[in-house]
Amino acid sequence: MEIVNNQSEKTEVKADILDKLLELSEAMLHGDYSKRILVDFDDETITKIVDNLNQLADKVQLNKIGDDYSQEQTVNDFIEVISSFANLDFKQKLPISENGTIMDAIATGINVLGDELEQSTASKQELEVERNRLNEAQAIAKVGSWEFNSDTYHLKLSDEAYRIFELEAMPGDKLLEKYLERIHPEDRASMDLFVKEALEKHGHFAMEYRIICRDEPIKYILCIGEASRDDKTKAMVVKGTIQDITAQKRTEETLKKAKEDAESANNAKSLFLATMSHEIRTPLNGILGLTEIMMGEEISDAHRDYLEIIASSGKNLSQLINDILDFSKIESGKLQLENINFDFNAVVSSNINRYKFLAKQKGLVLSHHIDESIPKDVIGDPNRVSQIITNLIG
C-alpha cells in the first residue's frame, strides 16, 4: 500500500508540473514572457526542461521592446537625447518601462550619463567663473601669480603676470628664458641669490627688482615667493606673486624730491631770516643810539616824549626781529624760555606806553592797572611777557 501511495503522489506531482509547463508555453506563445516556474524537482530531466524554459523567457523578455515604443522610435529617442548632450543640454531624459528590457537598461545608462555630464559641466562653469574672478582681481591689483619647477625648469605665469612682463603665452621651458631676459642686468645677480637661498632653506623670500619692457622702459616689481617640495613628484617647487609697483616707486621718488625741496626751501628761509635780522639791526642800532644821545641833551618836554616813543618803538622793532628769529627756533624745536629776575611793573608799563601815542591819535585812552598783590620783582622770561602784551594791545 505504501509503494502504491508514493507512486500515486509522484504521478500527481508530474501532472502538476506538466500543467505548469503547459501554462508557461502557452503564455510564451501569446507573447507573455513574465511567467516563471519556481519549483524544485526530483527529476533531473524535468528540472533541466524548466530551467531551459525559464532562461528562454528571460532572454526573450530582455530583448523585447516595450509596448509603448517601437524599436525605431526608441532608437530615435536615444539619438535625440545624446545629441542634446553636445549642446550642453542635459535636462532631457529617456522613459524607463517596468519590463526591464535591454532598451530600458540602455536608457537608464544614458540618463545616468546625462546627470553626470550636467554635474561635471556645472563644476567646470563654476571653476571658470572663479578663474575669471581671480584674473580680474589680479588685473585690478596689478598682481600676478607664478610657479617654477627647479627640476624641469618649467615656469608658469598667470594672465596678469604675462601682461606685467609683456610676454605671450609659450611653453614653460622657453618662458623661463624670456622671463629672465626681461630682468634688469644689474638685478639679475641679487635675484639669483634670493632664489638660491629660498631653495636651500625651503622658506619665504621677498625682493624688489627692475624689468625692461617695451611699453614702459623700466618697471619695478615686488616678488614674493615660497619654496617647498611637491608631495607627489618630490620636486622642488617655488611659487608666489609678482606685483607691479612702478606707480608706487614713482610716488615715493616724488615725495622724496618734494621733501628735499622743502628742506632746501626751509634752509633758504632760515638763511634769509638770519641775514635780514643782521641787516635790519645795523640801521636800527643807529636810530636807537642817536635817540639815546638826543635824550641826553637839553630838549623840550614834548620833544623828549617824542624821543621816548622813538626809542620805545625802536626797541619794539628790535624785539620783533628777535621774534622772527624765535619763530625759526620754534620750527626747529630749539626755542628756550629764560628764567631770570625782572621788574614786572616796568616791563608792563614800557610795553603799554609804546601804544599810548597811537591810541591818542585814534581818540582812544589807553590805561593800565597792576594789582598791588603782584610783586615788583618776579622770575621768568621778560621778552615773552613783552610779546604777549604787544600782541594783546596791537
Image (cartoon, helix red, strand yellow):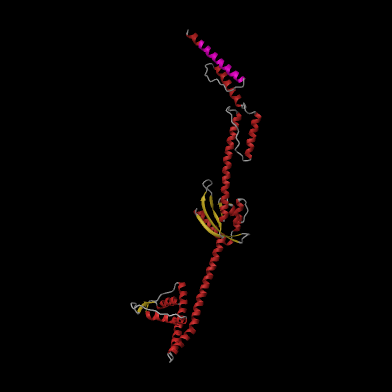
Point out the image quarter for the C terminus: bottom left
- The image shows residue 282, relative to residue 23, as above or below, that is below
**Farthest residue, direction bottom:** 298
What is the total number of numbered labels drawn onto the structure image? 0
191 falls in the magenta region: no
Whether residue 280 is visible, yes or no, is yes
Q: What residue is rendered at 59% in x and 36% in y?
A: 113
Q: Along the line of sight, which residue is nearer the eye, 185 or 249?
A: 249
- The image shows residue 246, relative to residue 1, as above or below, that is below
Q: Is residue 52 left or right of residue 331?
A: right
Q: Is residue 31 left or right of residue 272?
A: right
Q: What residue is rendered at 55% in x and 63% in y?
A: 251
20 falls in the magenta region: yes
Q: Position of residue 366 (x, y in %)?
A: 42, 80
- Magenta portion: prevailing SS class: helix
Q: Is residue 291 left or right of residue 53?
A: left
Q: What residue is rendered at 51% in x and 73% in y?
A: 266
Q: Position of residue 79 (x, y in %)?
A: 65, 34
Q: Along the line of sight, which residue is nearer the eye, 97 or 368?
A: 368
Q: Which residues are magenta?
A: 8-29
Q: Position of residue 286 (x, y in %)?
A: 48, 86
Residue 390 lies in quadrant: bottom left
- The image shows residue 10, relative to residue 388, as above or below, that is above
- The image shows residue 115, relative to residue 215, as above or below, that is above
Whether residue 157 is visible, yes or no, is no
Q: Along the line of sight, which residue is nearer the eye, 129 or 152?
A: 129
**Farthest residue, direction top:** 1
**Farthest residue, direction left:** 373
Q: Is residue 301 left or right of residue 197?
A: left
Q: Position of residue 296 (x, y in %)?
A: 42, 90
